[in-house]
Image: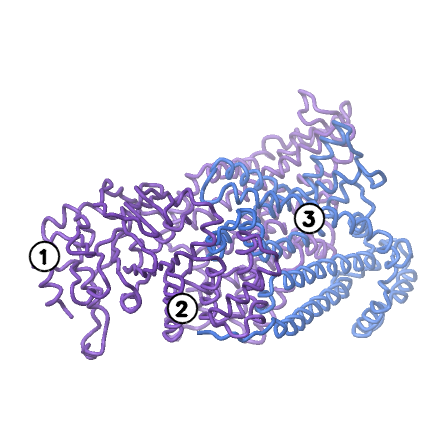
Chain colours: A purple, B blue
């Protein structure tokens, strides 16, 4: 019984479904193979429980003094007991008592658990706390121990065992009710009801309990399976059902006494208990997973790949027609081409979901199964990325990720996390590598680096963690730094420190920097060139110096217009781009920006424009003629 | 921006130790009180129940007086508590020997069985769970995943005493490979340990796999991969220690359940431990013995939980700042 509880604790409470979903849950359960099988088994068990005593009650009770304690035979499939009664029929007939007692214990236990679990939300505060801590203490004890304890109090016998198992279920159910109640209590509709003056008891019965009914029902099914096996355990130990009554546990105990002569009389009831327990458990599991699953939207396949006009290339990082594809033909990155030269800082901007981060992962060979990366050319430092050894990537390619809070391993000291780069790739000893880590921490201006190196990530501030992450990249000799939203999680002053640090690395080491950001002003301040991404493609590439004067693509101009500056009218509403970017699966033919574009024409909706060179270092993917775009850029909504 | 408020973690240990100690002592007190009240909650007269209806009233009265049952309840409670501090757990109604001696006699067999079974659980479940996580990462090898999940679900759903019966039927009776009962020979350990270990191992293996898969989706694992560490280091050095918290928390619950499971398994194998003793005592209505053994089992479970929390705090410094 304790074990099932552990699994359920691991899975967490099943999610709450809205009433409309509930019929769907039942249908999903019956459609899954496990759910259907266990449902059929449960029906069979109920049928046996109802009909077996009527059909075979006499044969199960018939005493045959000529056939005492026989082994299995065609006449007696599982043999006979010490009075010559047929064990097979006794197992069938015992279904009623076994299932009935298990359900009775479950109902009592669940009811008591519900009362205890919801009591804290109705009782006065201090009484609620007493109940909660009592439940917390009781939950720590395994169910079997509680059952034994209560079996002593209630006395051995059927009623005592029912109550013992019921009260052994109670604490875990009370805990579950408390957890679920707490999760619902924070919802808006509860707050609304409270504001409307709905009383606490009515709030509980009318608003809270109906919304947690589904996980409670699912867990009751699982509890019934546990109650069944626990009951068998008590009867088997001789403290449950007493003769002349018999359930599976009692038959099992009788069978075990003579297992040396014949295993069948013990194994028969054992199998019955296992099958019935499994039927309840699997049905509960199937229902839980059905309740947790939500229908997936159908995805459309994107249009065929498209070639990109190739320019000379030959930089530090050369990317041509890069695509990242996921199962189902979804491509969040669709034919991206760009080059990063030595000592150059390139910015990539775009809204969330434009494929920026995935591009960064793809060019650093970090896309994992089932994602698939293809490219006409993908070269780093003059060598195909796929053929570059890990040792070289580990020292020459530095990554800085968005969230410094989660990007360090919380269980290892910062110094060690830096040092392992040099240990693994440069063959340094632990001591030397740690000394180098301290040195690098000093280089990124972390105060007291010796002490800091011995600390865990949670002892660092966000800005320090991001600088430590950069220091980690400096453990090798970085040629390229890929920084994916390195400042998004930081406040403005810390942002600037991190950007300055990146600029310094670029200047001192002539390293290339690929800076990914959704913030076009950050990119404008620090980068040489800007790549604007939309729906998995580059829609415009231009030098930063021309960003405010010569941006052509309506998306770029809209991004720029959305940035407030000192001239912005404070009383006017903030400029936004209407609509939202398409999901990778929803991209149809035509320019993906067309639905949001003020300049979109017929051609924009049917045919996707290619990225075409406009002037030196300026490329744009848009059908509108140059004059129209220029007009839009200067006379736009700025 | 959050500033680094905790230096060296030293500031979090003391409150953690205090909080955990209070919880342990409270639970222990509740356990002791429940064990004390157990005898008084039994409907009717426990001595009469124990000695039977035919016992003369003088004998019952004398036995009640000897047990101190005639004193007021608070006085009895006080005697019970002070007795516990002197290591006294009362006297068996059946054999007349001190319950503490009885427990001292039987506890080692049970403790050895539980510890050995738990070691088997850990040694099997952790490597299997890690291996399955690595093999099935990112939705690979659906077949292997299905086979592992369904096998472990079925194994975990079979209660230990039924597994014990099945193992006895197959290996002891049919094949004659191991003794059916007792703990005399080395071979007699195999089946009880297996019966206790298989279910929890299946559950723990599943948990390790699920937890490790969840950890593999974390940003810091991507960082470790970005450092181009060998896969071995990514899994064992960076991922596994972060799956330890959940694994150990649930492992502690499993160990608690395993301790209780010895009661049933000992009865299948006629193992001379506390589990077979408590069942005999319940059937014979030897209440002081039951009371003492329940107390020992309960304290064992509480101790397991305490040890798990302390080990957790040592392995994962963050767990000391998490609220209980």
Q: Which of marks 3 and 1 is in front?
A: 1
Q: Distance between the residues labelled 2 and 1?
A: 38 Å
Sort mark 1 into few (<14), some (14-19) or many (20+) by Cα contacts within 10 Å: few
Q: Quadrant of the C terminus of chain A?
A: bottom left
Q: Mark 2 lies on which chain?
A: A
Left or right: A276, with A85 as reference point: left
Residue A252 x %, y %: 70, 37
Q: Name the residue under label 1.
A: A626
Residue at 61% x, 48% y: name it: B204
Q: Mark 1 lies on which chain?
A: A
Left or right: A118, with A188 as reference point: right
Q: Earlier in the sequence, mark 3 or mark 2?
A: 3
Residue A513 x %, y %: 35, 60
Toward the top, the furthest residue is A74
Sort mark 3 into few (<14), some (14-19) or many (20+) by Cα contacts within 10 Å: many
Q: Which of marks 3 and 1 is nearer the N terminus?
A: 3
């Amino acid at each position: 019984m304790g074990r099932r509880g552990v699994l359920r604790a691991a899975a967490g409470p099943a999610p709450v479904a809205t009433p409309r979903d509930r019929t769907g849950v039942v249908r999903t359960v019956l459609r899954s193979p496990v759910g259907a099988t266990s449902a059929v088994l449960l029906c069979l068990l109920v049928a046996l429980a109802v009909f077996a005593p009527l059909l075979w009650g006499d044969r199960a009770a018939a005493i045959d003094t000529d056939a005492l304690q026989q082994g299995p035979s065609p006449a007696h499939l599982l043999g006979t007991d010490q009075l010559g009664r047929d064990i097979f029929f006794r197992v069938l007939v015992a279904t009623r008592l076994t299932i009935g007692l298990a359900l009775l214990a479950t109902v009592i236990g669940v009811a008591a658990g519900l009362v205890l679990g919801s009591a804290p939300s109705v009782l006065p505060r201090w009484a609620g706390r007493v109940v909660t801590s009592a439940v917390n203490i009781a939950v720590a004890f395994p169910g079997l121990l509680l059952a034994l304890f209560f079996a002593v109090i209630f006395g051995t016998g059927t009623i005592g065992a029912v109550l013992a198992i019921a009260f052994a279920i109670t604490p875990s159910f009370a805990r579950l009710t408390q957890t679920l109640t707490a999760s619902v209590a924070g919802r808006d509709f509860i707050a609304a009801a409270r504001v409307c003056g709905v009383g606490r008891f009515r709030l509980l019965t009318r608003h809270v309990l109906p919304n947690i009914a589904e996980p409670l029902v699912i867990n009751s099914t699982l509890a019934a399976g546990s109650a069944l096996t626990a009951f068998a355990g008590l009867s088997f130990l001789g403290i449950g059902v007493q003769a002349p009554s018999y359930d599976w546990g009692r038959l099992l105990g009788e069978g075990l006494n003579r297992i040396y002569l014949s295993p069948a009389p013990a194994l028969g009831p054992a199998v019955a208990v296992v099958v019935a327990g499994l039927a309840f458990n699997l049905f509960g599991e199937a229902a839980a997973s059905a309740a947790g699953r939500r229908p997936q939207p159908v995805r459309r396949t994107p249009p065929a790949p498209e070639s990109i006009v190739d320019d000379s290339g030959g930089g530090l990082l050369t990317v041509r027609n890069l695509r990242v594809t996921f199962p189902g033909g979804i491509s969040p990155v669709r034919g991206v081409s760009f080059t990063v030269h030595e000592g150059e800082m390139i910015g990539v901007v775009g809204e969330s979901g434009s494929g920026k981060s995935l591009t960064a992962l793809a060019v650093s060979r970090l896309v994992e199964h089932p994602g698939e990366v293809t490219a006409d050319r993908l070269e780093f430092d003059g060598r195909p990325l796929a053929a570059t050894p890990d040792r070289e990537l580990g020292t020459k390619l530095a990554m800085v990720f968005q969230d410094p809070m989660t990007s360090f391993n919380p269980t290892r000291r910062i110094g060690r996390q830096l040092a392992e780069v040099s240990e693994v790739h440069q063959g340094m000893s632990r001591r030397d590598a740690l000394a180098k880590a301290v040195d690098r921490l000093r280089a990124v201006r972390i105060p007291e680096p010796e002490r800091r190196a011995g600390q865990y990530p949670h002892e660092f501030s966000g800005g320090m963690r991001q600088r430590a992450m950069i220091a980690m990249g400096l453990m090798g000799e970085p040629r390229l730094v890929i920084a994916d939203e390195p400042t998004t999680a930081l406040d403005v002053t810390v942002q600037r420190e991190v950007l300055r640090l990146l600029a310094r690395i670029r200047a001192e080491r002539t390293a290339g920097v690929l800076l990914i950001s959704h913030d076009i002003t950050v990119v404008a301040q620090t980068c040489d060139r800007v790549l604007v991404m939309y729906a998995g493609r580059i829609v415009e590439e231009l030098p930063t110096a021309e960003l405010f004067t010569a941006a052509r693509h309506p998306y770029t101009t809209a991004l720029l217009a959305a940035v407030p500056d000192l001239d912005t009218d404070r009383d006017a509403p903030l400029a936004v781009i209407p609509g939202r970017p398409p999901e990778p699966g929803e991209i149809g033919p035509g320019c993906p920006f067309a639905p949001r574009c003020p300049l979109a024409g017929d051609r924009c909706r049917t045919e996707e424009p290619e990225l075409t060179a406009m002037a030196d270092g300026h490329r744009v993917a848009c059908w509108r003629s140059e004059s129209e775009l220029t007009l839009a850029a200067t006379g736009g909504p700025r | 921006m959050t500033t680094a408020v905790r230096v060296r973690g030293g500031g979090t240990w003391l409150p953690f130790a205090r909080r955990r100690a209070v919880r342990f002592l409270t639970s222990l007190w509740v356990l002791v009180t429940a064990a004390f009240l157990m005898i008084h909650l039994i409907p009717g007269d426990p001595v009469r129940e124990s000695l039977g209806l035919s016992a003369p009233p003088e004998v019952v009265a004398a036995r009640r007086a000897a047990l101190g049952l005639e004193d007021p309840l608070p006085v009895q409670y006080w005697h019970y508590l002070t007795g516990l501090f002197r290591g006294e757990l009362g006297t068996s109604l059946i054999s007349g020997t001190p319950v503490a001696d009885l427990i001292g006699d039987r506890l080692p067999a049970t403790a050895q069985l539980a510890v050995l079974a738990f070691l088997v659980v850990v040694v099997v479940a952790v490597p299997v769970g890690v291996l399955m996580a690595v093999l099935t990462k990112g939705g690979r090898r659906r077949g292997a995943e299905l086979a592992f999940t369904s096998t472990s679900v079925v194994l975990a759903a079979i209660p230990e005493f039924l597994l014990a019966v099945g193992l006895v039927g197959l290996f002891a009776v049919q094949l004659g490979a191991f003794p059916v009962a007792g703990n005399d020979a080395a071979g007699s350990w195999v089946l009880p340990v297996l019966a206790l270990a298989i279910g929890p191992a299946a559950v723990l293996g599943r948990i390790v796999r699920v937890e490790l898969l969840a950890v593999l989706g974390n940003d810091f694992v991507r960082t470790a991969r970005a450092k181009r560490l060998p896969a071995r280091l990514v899994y064992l050095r960076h991922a596994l220690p972060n799956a330890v918290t959940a694994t150990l928390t649930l492992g502690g619950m499993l160990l608690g359940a395993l301790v209780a499971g010895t009661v049933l398994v000992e009865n299948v194998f006629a193992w001379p431990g506390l589990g077979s003793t408590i069942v005999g005592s319940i059937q014979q209505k030897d209440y002081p013995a039951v009371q003492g053994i329940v107390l020992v089992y309960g304290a064992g479970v509480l101790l397991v939980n305490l040890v798990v929390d302390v080990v957790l705090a040592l392995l994962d410094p963050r767990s000391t700042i998490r609220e209980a």
